[in-house]
Amino acid sequence: MKEKDTRALPLFLLKIGGAAAILAALFHWVEPEKIAGTLAEASPHWIQGAAIMVLLTQLLASVRLRFFLRATQVPSAYSKCLQATLAGLSLNLVLPARGGDAAKLLLLKNAGSSVTWSSLTGAGVLERASDVLALGILGLCASFATSMPATGTASLCVILATLTCLGLLPR
């Protein structure tokens, strides 16, 4: 117990230092006055609506992760799924090649020591496949709305390829 306590403070300070470094870099490259000016011109109703949608999206992504974990026989509390989803989202902003998704699985692995990597990887594959499937469906709907048949054909191919790959997964 003592060893964990001695590691907690440096880890916490590293997290705070990382967040401060990211904010410092952001304010170095982006002019806060321009952001404030743009936000002042925006309609508050649109900003509130966007904020609500972002929040709901993350809550629903956590529910979806929990469903996929249960499908792969991984018991997990909603709070752990929400924590992992938010951590993965945050890390995807700074890590290349969807590193946040790998970190999300690592966080879930550390939360439940009896969980196998193959079960977690299966849940991760299902989660990514559902994202690709949703994008294909959105593309197909957009192709109808914009009368772009080539986009519809490409979207349909994405949908069929995703469903085929899901069908080939072992049960």
Image (cartoon, helix red, strand yellow):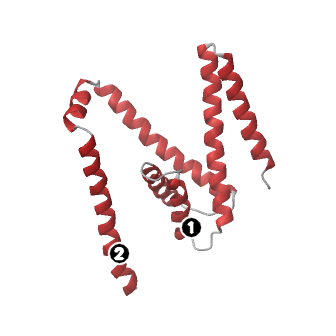
Q: Is residue 94 above or below residue 34?
A: below
Q: Quadrant of the N terminus?
A: bottom left
Query: Given the current orientation, which residue lies at the most extreme left position?
Result: 33
Q: Is residue 141 above or below residue 111?
A: above
Query: Given the current orientation, which residue lies at the most extreme bottom position?
Result: 2
Tag 2 residue: 8
Indicate left or right for 3 with 37 as reference.
Answer: right
Element at label 2: helix
Depth check: 136 or 74 in front? Answer: 136
The residue type indicated by label 1 comes to Lys
Residue 128 percent coordinates (x, y): 62, 47
The residue type indicated by label 2 comes to Ala
Residue 69 percent coordinates (x, y): 63, 57
Indicate left or right for 62 with 49 as reference.
Answer: right
Query: Given the current orientation, which residue lies at the most extreme top position?
Result: 147
Residue 107 percent coordinates (x, y): 51, 64
- Label 1 Cα neighbours within 10 Å, binned few <14 / some 14-19 / many ≥20: some
Q: Residue at x 45, y 56 (%)?
A: 87
Q: Residue at x 64, y 55 (%)?
A: 123
Tag 1 residue: 109
Determine the image quadrant of residue 52.
Answer: top left
Q: Residue at x 75, y 40 (%)?
A: 163
Depth check: 32 or 131 in front? Answer: 32
Q: Name which of mark 1 and mark 2 comes first in the sequence.
A: 2
Q: How far separated are the C-alphas under marks 1 and 2? A: 19 Å
Depth check: 54 or 155 in front? Answer: 155
Depth check: 67 or 162 in front? Answer: 162
Disc ID at residue 138? none
Residue 120 percent coordinates (x, y): 63, 61
Q: Quadrant of the C terminus?
A: bottom right
- Label 2 Cα neighbours within 10 Å, binned few <14 / some 14-19 / many ≥20: few
Q: Tell me how many marks there are.
A: 2
